[in-house]
Image: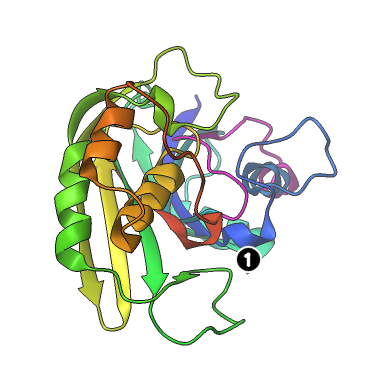
Amino acid sequence: MKRRVKITFSYDGSHFFGSQIQKNSKTVTVMGNFQKALKALGISNIAQASGRTDRDVHALNQVCHLDIPPYFDNLNKLKNTLNHHLMPYIFIKNIELVDMDFHARFSAKKRLYRYIVSHSSYSPTLADYVLFLPKLDLETINKSMKSFEGKHDFSYFKKQGSSTISSTRVIYKAYMYRYKNYSVINFLGNSFLRSQIRMMCSFLFEIDRGKLDITDLEEQLNLKRKIHTSLVPASGLYLSRIYY
């Protein structure tokens, strides 16, 4: 009898063309590499992730579920063996047994994303992991972010070509805090549209620069007019945690 496991893992998105398996088998993706590692262990079942992340987006605690054959009774050994194939850019943090009705995507209640801005001098060794900007005004950003909280139709805050049926999402909490010489922007929601967070952050940075204001933000959020649809680089974005 097969058993279902929940796998929590992290990855460095700068080494992949996104997380989702592509039709072109030569395209290097997170879940593509994951399946190759499973195949090396004789596991043919497909691992189902909680959602996709775009090229250059990182994950601290991505989750997938997988049905494994009964002879894999030592989950710690399974984790170590998979990590041998996946490291250094993908790392499994935990594997645990779950009920057969658990689904990494559909069982998820909330998702937390973080966008990290460095206020230090530019460093090429950090360029794949943060966005370099001058100091952001904490009060201005947090006041603006409150407009995103609640249930909204985010049709004007998504990348064109998104295949979702509905653009309505719920953001439970949106805030920024400072840590040393970094600003960390947090969005906790039920789920997010393609490039939604990168577009929201870009809008916030324009408000911080004085180029836009909260009125502009609310007009776009209420679908009155599209004002600003640019994206910040994906390198500063992290899937931080999935809540079940």
Relative vertical location of residue 52 with respect to residue 175 in this rendering, above or below = above
Where is residue 167? Give x, y as percent.
39, 20
Q: Residues within 10 Å of mark 1 (few under 14, many from 20)?
A: few
Residue 196 makes an appearance in the image: yes
Q: Is residue 147 magenta?
A: no
Q: Name the amino acid type tagged 1.
A: Met
Q: Is residue 238 left or right of residue 44?
A: left
Relative vertical location of residue 97 with respect to residue 179 in this rendering, above or below = above
97 or 112: which is nearer to us?
Answer: 112
- Circle 1 residue: 87
Relative vertical location of residue 168 with respect to residue 150 in this rendering, above or below = above
Q: Is residue 55 magenta?
A: yes
171 or 64: which is nearer to us?
Answer: 171
218 or 10: which is nearer to us?
Answer: 218
**In this picture, which residue range is highlighted in magenta?**
37-56
Relative vertical location of residue 42 with respect to residue 125 in this rendering, above or below = above
- Residue drawn at 32 percent across, 49 percent down: 212
